[in-house]
Image (cartoon, rainbow, N blue to C red):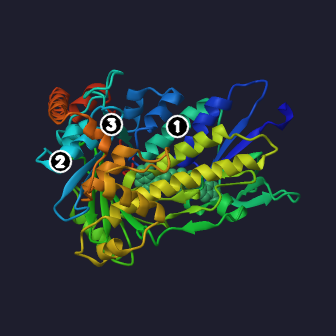
Amino acid sequence: MDDKAIRKIVIVGGGTAGWMAAAPLAQLLGGHAHRPCEIVVVESPEIGTVGVGEATLPPIRYYNQTLGLDGADFVKKTQATFKLGIEFKDWGRLGHRFFHGFGDFGPQVHNRSSFLYWLRLAQTGEMPPYEDWSTATVMARQNRFTPPSGDVPSASNAYSFAFHFDAGLYAAYLRDYAMQRGVQRIEGTIVDVELRPEDGFVAAVKLRDGRRVDGDLFIDCSGFRALLIGGAMKSAYEDWSHWLPCNSAQAVPCARVEPLAPYTVSTARAAGWQWRIPLQHRTGNGHVYCSHFTTDDEAARVLLDSLDGEALDAPRQLRFTTGLRRESWVKNVVAVGLSSGFLEPLESTSIQLIMDAVGTLVQMFPDRDFRPGLAAEFNRKTAKQYESIRDFIILHYKLTERSDSEFWRHCAAMPIPDTLAHQIEVFRESGRIVILDRDSFAEPSWISMMFGLGLRPRAHDPFVELVDESALRTHLTRLREAIAGTVAAMPDHTRYIERHAKADPLPSGRPVAVAA
Ligand SMILES: Cc1cc2nc3c(=O)[nH]c(=O)nc-3n(C[C@H](O)[C@H](O)[C@H](O)COP(=O)(O)OP(=O)(O)OC[C@H]3O[C@@H](n4cnc5c(N)ncnc54)[C@H](O)[C@@H]3O)c2cc1C
């Protein structure tokens, strides 16, 4: 058994994906003298990283906890702020805003979301907005933050949170963690990949300076270049741009503005949308757009014209194609991060997909026999999760009522995957949410987006009628008051950071990069 164990892992790429893969593998495989496993990360100083990727989803906390990272230290070292969700402006229709908060609409009632009970009352009379039952949303409206507490479901813990952080500082933080646990870092540019003649597995990568780095398992974290998975393994790329037409972004940092919002802002623009991500040392901004409907210059102008603070650099342009590799694991190559696929950052899902890919790799970890079932399961799970997130993102565009630009008219008219059409139809008919993949967005997220974008169910769940109407009204009123009262007693987000996780100033002379 032992002689088949993986003895050397080569991670190609030292961006967020490379170090997010290296850190847990070092934690799990390092320090076992009876079965040593070398881990090497190869990164190219000439090529650099994509330099964006600053907003995350709540499971990042469990990733950090599993590594044993100190929460406050992590926030300080990465200039992070807390994220309760995303505010959507001008999506659905111009002048309209709504919030996609992390967490449910208050504690569930008889295993059903409080939203479904709210819907029943709202369909027969006047009700305050459903967002009043989302603790995360009420907190975000008032710029308040404190972590949820207690195990018993209540107004004070029916929410979750993630982080905004500096992507370059996060990768550096994980790099230090991994290298302290024995991971070796090799600086160099890979110019060739050597395949084993007998089976086409990767034997080694060759660097420009002549060095050869061999290994048993190769994790391709080389970003959009997809050096091993696309290059050597020739795994085809499934292009989804007919459903998600945005193919470009301009990104620029600007000076920090007050108050420090505990949420991302996503503002729809004429040919795409713009992000605003508050960090402790600056605000990250970007304009994601479709180059068929606007020019790069116009996209940069729209971005620069709508910054909250002084621009700290010139906008940097990125190009991408939304889609997924047909197979992310081929032979002894496993793709993690941008090399495996890309979904635009509208719901901050890429880092989540990295975490999940690393988790699945650990679950399906091979020995040197590389039994095909392991790769098949990895590929099945990856495809399912990507497809579900893809549908969730398409929903943001498809449900628009905007017709003020060619881009939005295109989005409203475009065909969508059958899976998404089914989800929309079930919600429209009955207010019920169909969850096609448990590793993707949960019911409250789908409700926030469907309802926020203007889709109104025609009927409601008959089970919610089992509760007496006046008892239900009293329950919802009390719950709303409890949420409002709980939030009113929470500290301001900026003050919470100052007290618990204020970052040290960056060393002077550090260049202000887009995100790295
Ligand atoms: C516009 C935009 C906004 C985004 N926003 C978010 C967000 O808010 N939230 C989120 O979760 N995700 C976001 N993402 C995605 C996120 O940036 C990536 O998932 C994340 O940075 C991981 O990138 P990566 O490590 O796969 O690739 P990269 O950062 O590109 O790293 C690639 C690495 O491979 C190395 N490399 C490449 N070629 C070679 C070679 N020949 N030899 C040696 N080394 C090589 C490079 O040196 C580098 O170290 C965004 C992406 C884009 C494009």
Q: Is residue 86 left or right of residue 480?
A: right
Lower sequence index among marks 3 and 2: 2
Question: Does residue 284 appear in the picture of this structure?
Answer: no
Q: Where residue 174 is drawn, which disc sits there?
A: 1
Label 2 close to label 1 by CB (< 8 Å)? no
* Above-or-below relation of 270 to 81: below
Q: Which residue is mark 2?
A: 122
Q: Nearer the viewer, mark 1 or mark 3?
A: 1
Q: Nearer the viewer, residue 474 or 281?
A: 474
The first of marks 1 and 3 along the sequence is: 1
Quadrant position of the N terminus in the picture: top right
- Give residue 356's position: percent from left, percent from top: 54, 43
Is residue 223 rendered to the left or right of residue 441? Answer: right
The type of residue carrying mark 3 is Pro
Residue 270 place in picture, x, y as percent: 27, 71
Q: Mark 2 belongs to which amino acid?
A: Ala
- Disc 2 secondary structure class: helix
